[in-house]
Image (cartoon, grey):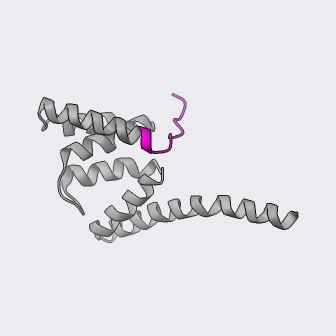
Amino acid sequence: MIFRYVLFLMSLLIPVSSVIAGFEEGEAANREGDRATAFAEYQAAAMAGDDRAYGKLGSMYLYGLGTERDYSMAYVWFGLSKDAGDKYGERFQQTAASVMTAEEVRQAETLLNDYRRQLPSPDVPDK
């Protein structure tokens, strides 16, 4: 019985450690200037629900680092970072919106809502 309990606890830790590793690997790659690897690691971490990666992805899309510049995706990821409590998320989301048409913003809002439904809900800090 104890063995099963220990296995259960270990299984809970594996997904968390892999998410943390993806973000940390992204940070290391970014520091080394390997933007493509950083982008891939941040994306994997973000899709697994690591909200620390949301603003990082937004920046990479906004400036075209490790990926093609995509203001709509920058808008989406900055929106998610704002939802997660990032104090700069809204400002950078507005920066992305400032170079988009009204129709592009509308489409990005639709995509943002899709991501909100797909991704795990972030733990929003108390304000």
From the viewer's perspective, is 96 left or right of 101?
right
Against 27, is 51 above or below?
above
From the viewer's perspective, is 39 left or right of 20?
left
Q: In which quarter of the image is the N terminus?
A: bottom right
Against 123, is 26 above or below?
below
Percent coordinates x, y for residue 14 in the rendering: 61, 64
User: Going 87% across and 64% down the picture, which residue do you hit?
Assistant: 2
- Choose top left, top right, bottom left or bottom right for residue 34: bottom left
Visible residue check, residue 1? yes
Against 28, is 9 above or below?
above
Q: Does the magenta stretch include residue 1?
A: no
Percent coordinates x, y for residue 44 in the rendering: 41, 60
Depth check: 6 or 78 in front?
Answer: 6
Depth check: 33 or 74 in front?
Answer: 74
Against 99, is 70 above or below?
below
Q: Does the magenta stretch include residue 124?
A: yes
Percent coordinates x, y for residue 6 in the rendering: 79, 64
User: Going 40% across and 68% down the picture, which residue do you hit?
Assistant: 28
From the viewer's perspective, is 117 left or right of 40?
right
Q: Which span is picked out in magenta? A: 117-127
* Extreme residue in the right direction: 1
User: Going 83% across and 67% down the picture, which residue do you hit?
Assistant: 3
Visible residue check, residue 88? no
